Amino acid sequence: MNKSFLIIGVTLLSLSITFIFGATQEHEMLVSVYASQYSIPILEDAGLYIYAIEDGYIRGAITPSNINKLTALGYKYEILIPDMVKYSEQVAPGPDLGRYHSYQEIMDTFNLVANNYPNLCHLDTIGQSPTGRYLLALKISENAQQEMHRPRMLWDGTTHGNENIGTEVCWYIMQQLIFKYGLDPSITNLVNTREIWIIPCINPEGLINRTRGTTVCQDLNRDYGYAWRTGSGSGMSTPWSQPETRGFRNFLQKHPFALHMTYHSGATSVMWPWSYSTIATLDSISHAELCNRYHNYTGYSAYQISRGLYVCYGTATDFSYGEEGALGLAAEISTGQPPAVSQIDTIAHANWTASKDLMIRCAYGIRGAITDSITGTSIKKAIVVPNPPNWVTYTDTCGWYFKYVQPGNHAITVFADGYLPKTINGVTVPTDSYIEVDIQLKPDSIAKITGYKLATWICPSTTAAGNTMGFWALGPRDGRAHKLSTRGSVVIEMSRPVMDIIGIDFTVCSISSKPCSVFVSDTGWTGSWHLCAYGTGNIYCDLTTAGTNVARYIKVADANQNYELDAIETGISPAIAELPTYDIRPLILTVKPNPFRHITQIRWQAPANSNTRLKIFNVTGRLVKDFFALTDNQNLITNNCIIWDGKDNSSKQLPKGIYFVQLQNDNYKQVEKVVLTK
Ligand SMILES: [Zn+2]
């Protein structure tokens, strides 16, 4: 590390804040537990934080009060380090952790660098820890105070407070980019053409206390809201429970990233998502390619997190890829916990050379501007889907998008609120370079409001989690669904707030007829929530029911059957006819007269023996009339025709209003809107 740089010890009070000491935490011990990978869920529930799975044993950290649980469960273990905090003090002694930088040094130095290099740096914060310590984010880019059209990439360290070797690598990367700018042509080019962000420390309190978790002992890397579940390392009842993770999400809302690399330690590996499942990401070719390149510089093993390490939930990489579309990567950069001071420079340098390669490559692929075809203004909230990989990415505040894709032929589809969707075919991406594809969208004054971004996905069921895609719940209906998992739920940010109008305000669309509840929030992505509807399949929602007149976020909660959420759209049943899946339907349904006062005649045609059912729902999606399983009651039906008298299942007269007659068999569904005027 540059020695002259370490002399910087000036305390800059502008960002200094009062220290508030949290409650005393138990110091964790490092143990080897003799167990196979099948014991992982049990060990996690017992409080073991797993660093590595090796032949016949699992290495991890656990508190002294939890170690008895292992004994009670019948596991044998060996204590490798009895007190990890004390060990850390031996390895990195002194008030400033020896050559490991202290929190105050990080604050002072990053602030000083930003002040001294205003053309190359812009210092921001992503929020504060519970005791008010800032989480710094440094943008490094030529002309840094301006918003430029440059691919954006993010490095962060020390999500786990005692893994602060990651902070040292971030620090080293910052030094290389800034102090070699203008001297090294390749670095100068990177800073001139990319926007590189560094968050040196996600968990200041853990760094200060030399503990993995925060002052409230929460593991931040189990608190992110994509494929989150309780237990499994999270002691909380909801994701996004900590200000550090909420701040990280808010930061990514402002700055969509092409790449996100997060540093940990405890093993030597470079990894891609998913953490929560062993299914491949749709970007798995790029994910594996980038990690294999990283391996070439560092020697780290390259694998998918869930396959090489273990399955875990609520991680930063699953969030940054799953919800934000950044190519999320994670690297475990040393087995030593912490590595000896003498190893810092070697580790930092290896990771810098590998990261520099990522910086070069992740600007390749596809980029461009999304604009209004009439006014030419940039569209700042567009969903861009290059195919392959057919995974989502977002435009930034300049209306630009960047996506690293493999060379070859691609299509690009764009959705944006108030515009007609558009697909560009035949986009050929060159090798080791990029293609710029600017796309103009035509305004559409009657465009539906649809899901823009996933804010949270709670996934309690491990078995149901294996075959699901969060992004498939966004945009208009397309016959592809995100399976919520049994008792799971999602929060969808709508492309703009849904307003209360007379009748149906929005429809929750499914590809099957399983049950769920629908809640709305007019305040924020973490609630508070108002129940709007409960129903099965497509659910027609009226905000009046929720007692609110606007919904910016909509939460769909499964009612125990793994609800399959295709989309959330404003508008009502006529749109169902537009869905391609239903275009070739062998079901015919007519309701006449419509509107009706006393009786109406429901007629249909359906294939024989196809388990046809006929039901009527009100506008909140509640079932009011379930005629019968038609195949079982053929003798009650005359020529596939039923007279409906506007009464419900208990023969009570229903109030006037809109109702939906739904004809469904095992493969198809047909819905007709009917108006009762009495
Ligand atoms: Zn970690």
Image (tube, rainbow, N blue to C red):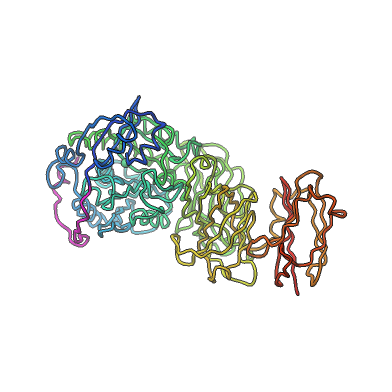
Magenta residues span 1-25
The percent position of residue 408, horizontal first and vertical second, equals 55, 37
Question: In front here: 518 or 400?
Answer: 518
Quadrant of the image containing the N terminus: top left
Q: Which residue is drawn at the image coordinates 79% and 72% (left, top)?
A: 597
Residue 254 in view of the camera: yes
Visible residue check, residue 292? no
The answer to whether residue 127 is left or right of residue 565 is left
Q: Residue furthest right?
A: 639
**Total numbered circles:** 0
Q: Is residue 32 above or below residue 282?
A: above
Q: Main secondary structure of the magenta part?
A: loop
Image quadrant in which you'd find residue 114: bottom left
Quadrant for ligand 1? top left
The picture places residue 340, in percent across and down from the top left corner, at 19, 35
Taking depth in this image into account, of 287 and 264 the one nearest to the observer is 264
Q: Quadrant of the C terminus?
A: bottom right
Quarter of the view holding residue 160 = top left
Q: Residue at x 59, y 57 (%)?
A: 568
**Is 17 covered by the magenta stretch?**
yes
